[in-house]
Image: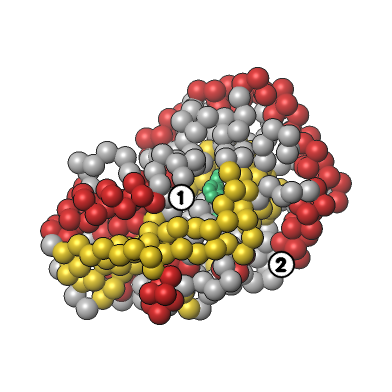
């Protein structure tokens, strides 16, 4: 494909309510969007890097810098014939996977349009609908935590994930289980625990959780493998899995029994598919994680979730959980059965509201070949 221009934009969007994790509170997102124009088509990508380097070492500002100075110029002059060539084009740049993913995924988005295929089909997806869960942030009170869960259970979501940290865990799970003994429940610590907490983590077994997500260090496999030996509950790794090799190491070491795949965290669709396939071949189920995306990232997550081994409900939920007004049309909606229908039309299946994007833009840079 002949790339005419790559446009980087920063948009700012307030969340409908603050989202609290063990590493901080987010009230407004600063998001880098990537628009690639080629042969009369426009592909979009969304960078999931945060405002601060708290989830990963990337931020929107590092992603902007490396995209503008390295990745976008390399891509614009490479004119790839297939989106799967992107990892190779970006290969000289170490790390910066969220920046790479934003660009690579825009190329997949473009390629799907050019080949008149649904993005899900281009990626090799087979699901017509995807099962949805929700991630619920740490709340100011237990009462508010329970009312948030009640709202999402009533909306039909198939799995409730609770953000947790030392001091906000067993007491909460106990209250939730008393009220809802049978819902599919999991927790996500975002690396908030240490080996001193091992007995405490083992006590979570009594709450019949589907999984405990990333309890220990964000770069660890070994200590997770020791913890997994002590737990009946499955560990799910998120932060630790950066690529296919990490997935193989984690599976081989039995550091986890489930893997969360995030497009941005692994560097784009090519690597996300490679992680998916490696896990599938070894009988490890995966699910699609979320990073408080707008509709652009959300539409890409829906397409990815249509692959066969995404058998557990993901953190891909309705636009309205996060945004007063999403930047795509139609917005992402979830059925009362807790499912999202995978679009069958060419490309991502949702129109980008360019009028809104323009209004929300606070920074813009264009890169040409
Ligand atoms: O660890 O899964 C995570 C949000 C920001 C950063 C990290 C995580 C999350 C979530 C939210 O859990 C998932 C979503 O987008 O709904
Ligand atoms: Mg997580």
Say which of 369 and 355 sits in front.
Answer: 355
Could you tell me residue 338's position as x and y percent? 65, 65
Check whether the beta carbons of the residues at disc 1 and disc 2 lie within 8 A of each other: no
144 vs 217, left or right, is: right
Could you tell me residue 152's position as x and y percent? 71, 61
The residue identified by callout 1 is: 51
199 vs 276, left or right, is: right
Label 2 sits on a secondary structure element that is helix
Question: Is ligand 1 less than 8 Å from the beta carbon at label 2?
Answer: no
Could you tell me residue 167's position as x and y percent? 73, 34
When the figure is inspected, residue 46 is found, relative to residue 346, above or below; the finding is above
Residue 264 marker: none
Q: Is residue 267 visible?
A: no
Q: In the rendered image, which quarter contains the C terminus?
A: bottom left
Which quarter of the picture shows residue 132?
bottom right
Could you tell me residue 106's position as x and y percent? 32, 63
When the figure is inspected, residue 323 is found, relative to residue 201, above or below; the finding is below
The residue lying at 42 percent from left, 59 percent from top is 31
Say which of 352 and 325 sits in front.
Answer: 325
Residue 155 marker: 2
The residue lying at 75 percent from left, 29 percent from top is 203
Closer to the chain start, of discs 1 and 2, is 1
CA gap, disc 1 and disc 2: 30 Å
Q: Tag count in the figure? A: 2
Say which of 64 and 106 sits in front.
Answer: 64
Observer-side mark, 1 or 2, equals 1
Label 1 sits on a secondary structure element that is loop
Instruction: Specify few, some or many for label 2: CA neighbours under 10 Å numbering under 14, 14-19, or 20 or more.
Output: some
């Amino acid at each position: 494909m002949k790339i005419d221009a790559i446009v980087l934009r920063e948009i700012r969007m307030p969340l409908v309510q603050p989202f609290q994790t063990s590493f901080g509170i987010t009230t407004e997102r600063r998001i880098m969007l990537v628009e690639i124009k080629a042969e009369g088509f426009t592909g979009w990508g969304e960078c999931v890097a945060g405002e601060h380097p708290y989830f990963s070492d990337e931020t929107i500002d590092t992603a902007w810098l490396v995209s503008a100075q390295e990745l976008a110029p390399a891509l614009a002059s490479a004119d790839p014939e297939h989106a799967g060539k992107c990892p190779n084009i970006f290969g000289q740049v170490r790390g910066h996977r969220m920046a790479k993913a934003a660009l690579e995924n825009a190329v997949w988005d473009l390629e799907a349009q050019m080949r008149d295929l649904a993005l899900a089909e281009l990626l090799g997806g087979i699901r017509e609908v995807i099962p949805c869960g929700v991630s619920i942030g740490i709340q100011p009170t237990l009462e508010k935590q329970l009312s948030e869960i009640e709202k999402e259970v009533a909306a039909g979501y198939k799995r409730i994930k609770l953000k947790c940290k030392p001091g906000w865990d067993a007491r909460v799970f106990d209250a939730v289980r008393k009220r809802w003994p049978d819902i599919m429940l999991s927790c996500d610590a975002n690396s908030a625990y240490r080996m001193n907490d091992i007995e405490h983590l083992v006590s979570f077994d009594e709450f019949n959780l589907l999984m405990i997500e990333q309890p220990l260090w964000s770069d660890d496999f070994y200590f997770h493998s020791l913890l997994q030996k002590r737990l009946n509950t499955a560990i799910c790794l998120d932060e630790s899995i950066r690529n296919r090799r990490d997935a193989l190491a984690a599976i081989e070491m039995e550091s986890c029994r489930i893997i969360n795949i995030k497009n941005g965290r692994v560097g784009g669709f090519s690597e996300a598919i490679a992680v998916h396939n490696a896990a599938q071949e070894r009988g490890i189920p995966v699910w699609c994680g979320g990073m408080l995306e707008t509709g652009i990232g959300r539409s890409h997550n829906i397409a990815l979730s249509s692959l066969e081994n995404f058998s557990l409900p993901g953190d891909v939920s309705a636009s309205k959980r996060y945004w007063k007004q999403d930047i795509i049309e139609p917005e992402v909606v979830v059925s009362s059965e807790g499912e999202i229908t995978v679009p069958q039309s060419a490309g991502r299946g949702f129109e980008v509201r360019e009028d809104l994007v323009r209004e929300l833009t606070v920074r813009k840079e264009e890169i040409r070949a």
